[in-house]
Image (cartoon, rainbow, N blue to C red):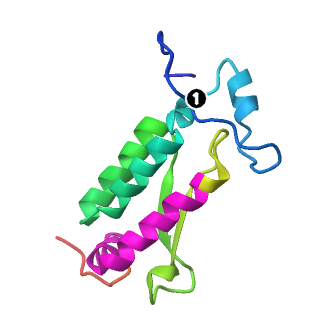
Amino acid sequence: MNPVQPSIPVPIREACPPGACTCEREKLLGDPNGDTRILLLTKDQEKKLIARIETISSYDDLKHVQERIHDQLGVLLQISPSVHGVRTVRGLTIQLGPRPGLCRKTQQAIPAAIRRCLEQNPHIVYALLDAQDLLGAPPQS
């Protein structure tokens, strides 16, 4: 299913140099049923997304950005505590779900931006852990 069927030309992400990426961009473009929304994330749009991520100021804002990434690009952004525990932000696993067309650099840049944001806003990390009941919050009645 391809929800993006533009009738006017829309800029899409340029191809990575040969051998530099494993995004399978050409395979995605060749698939008539492929979801090409991820290709709308041009390098300029990626910079804007990174800047937006770095301005996240609350847990609700983080959830909103996760939803928008999923809705607009079809990419699932997962943030979860490590099985070894969370002592710092490095104890969180932050990753984008695999998708054809998702550039290797983007797969690294977005989690890095989220990590920088969380380092600047530890209250978001506490809210994230609390939402997963890792801080031992009492059950709500």
**Nearest the eye: 133 or 105:** 105
Q: Residue furthest top?
A: 7
> Within 10 angstroms of label 1, few (less than 14), some, or many (20 or more) residues?
many
**Image location of residue 78, percent across then percent down:** 49, 59
- Quadrant for the C terminus, please: bottom left
Q: Dot 1: what SS?
A: helix
Residue 27 visible to an observer of this rendering = yes
**Image location of residue 139, percent across then percent down:** 24, 76
Residue at 52%, 26% (x, y): give it: 11
**With 141 as the anchor, is 20 left or right in this view?**
right
Magenta span: chief secondary structure: helix
Q: Residue furthest bottom?
A: 87
Magenta-colored span:
106-132
**With 110 as the anchor, is 100 left or right in this view?**
right
**Nearest the eye: 75 or 24:** 24
**Image location of residue 31, percent across then percent down:** 71, 22
Residue at 52%, 38% (x, y): give it: 42
Q: Is residue 124 above or below residue 45?
A: below
Residue 1 placement: quadrant: top right
Q: Residue furthest right?
A: 19
**Nearest the eye: 116 or 33:** 116
Residue at 62%, 44% (x, y): give it: 102
Residue at 58%, 35% (x, y): give it: 13
Q: Is residue 61 above or below residue 7?
A: below
Residue 72 placement: quadrant: top left
Tell me if residue 9 is in the magenta stretch: no
**Image location of residue 53, percent across then percent down:** 37, 58
What's under tag 1, amino acid-wise? Thr
Q: Identify residue for label 1.
A: 36
